[in-house]
Image: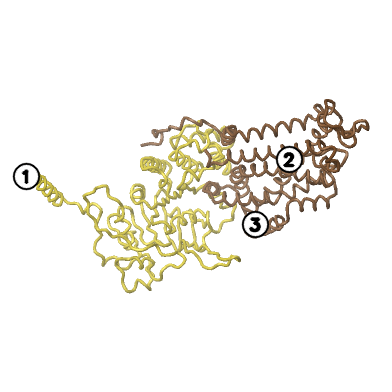
Chain colours: A yellow, B brown
Amino acid sequence: MTALLAVRDLAKHFPVRRGAFGLVSGHVRAVDGVDFDLAAGETLAIVGESGCGKSTVGRLVLRLIEPSVGSVRFEGEDLLALSDGDMRARRQHMQVIFQDPYASLNPRMTVGAMLGEPLMLHGLAKGEAARRARTAELLDLVGLRPDHARRYPHEFSGGQRQRLAIARALAVEPRLIVADEPVSALDVSIQAQVINLMRALQRRFGLAYIFISHDLAVVKHIADRIAVMYLGKIVETATTEELFRQPRHPYTRALLAAVPVPDPTVQRERALLEGDLPSAMAPPPGCRFHTRCPFLRDGCRSDVPALADDGTGHATACPWWREFPPAPTLAAARGPDRDRARLERLQAAFVSAQREAT
Amino acid sequence: MTAATLPTAVPAESQEENPWARAWRRLRRRKGAMVGLAVVALFVLLAVFAPLVAPYDPTATSWSAVRKAPSWAHWMGTDEVGRDVLSRVLYGARASLSAGLVSVGIALGIGVPLGLLAGYAGGWIDSVLSRIVDAMLAVPFLILAIALAAFLGPSLTNAMIAIGVTATPIFVRLTRGQTIAAKVEDYVEAARAVGNPHWRIALRHVLPNIVPPLLVQASLAIAGAIIAEAALSFLGLGQQPPAPSWGSMLNSAQRFLANAPWMAFWPGFAIFFAVLSFNLLGDGLRDALDPRHR
């Protein structure tokens, strides 16, 4: 089976212009050599901190930004070789959902016009009646009412707006949806609704998602596989289960250690990263993570590590991961012995306090 | 959980109110703007129905009523050849208002498409257009209008064209700036993602969202154009005698300021009120259409 999407050596270097004459004084290497595959119906999450290039990857895949180098093959066809007109036609199969539902809906278009537009552009529902029926169907799919088609975006709440954005993406019956932080701008309770809606729609229509997020808790919920990005490169990919069970790259370990656990008694390794994300204009030589890595070795400063697959689909861009101490998994830090000891200490304190009072 | 069971509550207020209806509701709350709108409407009505309202033919001379002070027969007095000032002010409103509307129409018609092109396309197109605009804006408004009107020849139509062309660079610049701000919005990127061609993004997604500032600028530019028309007519480059215009009336009145001040007062008064009203309306529109004012 060929992958739905095959991305190879994808890179985007934004020129930085300075001065009155706009001379190029450097390049921001937002994305610097990214490879991944995506199967039909699969969800790949791209995670990483702000500025690591994850959103740029999403836009490059959809060719909303032109890549500097690399290839993006969608169903075997190289998107980057297509003319503007051909690319527009291919957009029927690949859609996008943005982070901020207050910014991603045209404030001067009714919901009906917004949902009808892609239908018209791709000749999907011919005629006014067919278009209206399809619009009503789309609204129903995302849990809104057909009569909402007459309204304007400002009349909806954030969660409802994000559903409208999902409905717009679904209008053309795509096979791939790039979701760029689709729930980050929403309340936690609404996040769950939107995530569940996305999962339900995925099962129903066999959609593949590229789910871009910085929130590992959300990612764990929806992704089949995860790619961890750092400074424009993928440092680790694995299935979701495997990545949470055994994070290998020092950066992944630090990310997972930073996920909050809703249990105040849990004691964990605090593998906090020091320093800031280095500038993408002048990324560090060798391994890009070496400036912040707690397991720094001699070769890290000069040798660029390759993303090496161990044969099971778990790939890590760190040659030393086998030598690191095992990462504490999130639940293991808590055992029955520790709980009992804690309980005894509390009881002892209570008894001594009572004795003093009498 | 399936999609169908999700809650579908929508805020009860603001049911199906389109953005223009909302702007109108906000505009109505502003007294200054409503006064401006009322006076503008009054001037427009008077100009349209001038033949019915005016007591005399604006070009009919009368040697028995030269430079008469305001009276029951001539409410605003008469001018140096005995023409009724009231009738001339009413007919002059036609020249002034049409000069305002037509020249701003010309400026919008040329400026908005060029600004949209420059802002949306960017690159060398933007560079070339912006430099031309800069060059035009470097020349004072009235000087350029006078030069153009003199080049085209004295007539009201040419004055309108001259004022319109002179006012164009402001609209190019405004439209360009607004377009640049709007084209990086997520909804514009979303419009690309669903497969819109560029021309459709520019016209259907960018343009409707930049109309409010253009509308404000247009209402203020009408006020400026009325003054410019008066100035050109005052200099003899606009409305040609004997047809009346507020500017040309001022021109002929200046020689008699000492002994027939009403000849200058009424057209000056009309210019003042028309300009003030358009400015009040423009300020009100600016507030009503600004999404930050709720």
Question: What residue did someone put label 3 on?
Answer: B126
Between B54 and A236, the one nearer to me in the picture: B54
The numbered mark, 2 or 3, whose residue comes first in the sequence reads 2
Q: Are marks 3 and 1 on the same chain?
A: no
Q: CA distance from mark 2 to mark 3?
A: 28 Å
Amino acid at circle 1: Arg
Q: Is residue A282 above or below residue B225?
A: below
| Residue name at image x 43 percent, y 42 percent | A205
Q: Position of residue B48 (x, y in %)?
A: 77, 31
Between B186 and B91, the one nearer to me in the picture: B91
| Residue name at image x 75 percent, y 36 percent | B270
Work out which residue is located at the far top of the displayed protein and give it: B72
Question: What residue did someone put label 1 on?
Answer: A355
Q: Is residue A224 above or below residue B52?
A: below
- Mark 1 belongs to which subunit? A
Q: Are marks 2 and 3 on the same chain?
A: yes
Judge the density around disc 1: few (<14), some (14-19), many (≥20) Cα neighbours within 10 Å: few
In the picture provided, is B57 more to the left or to the right than B136? right
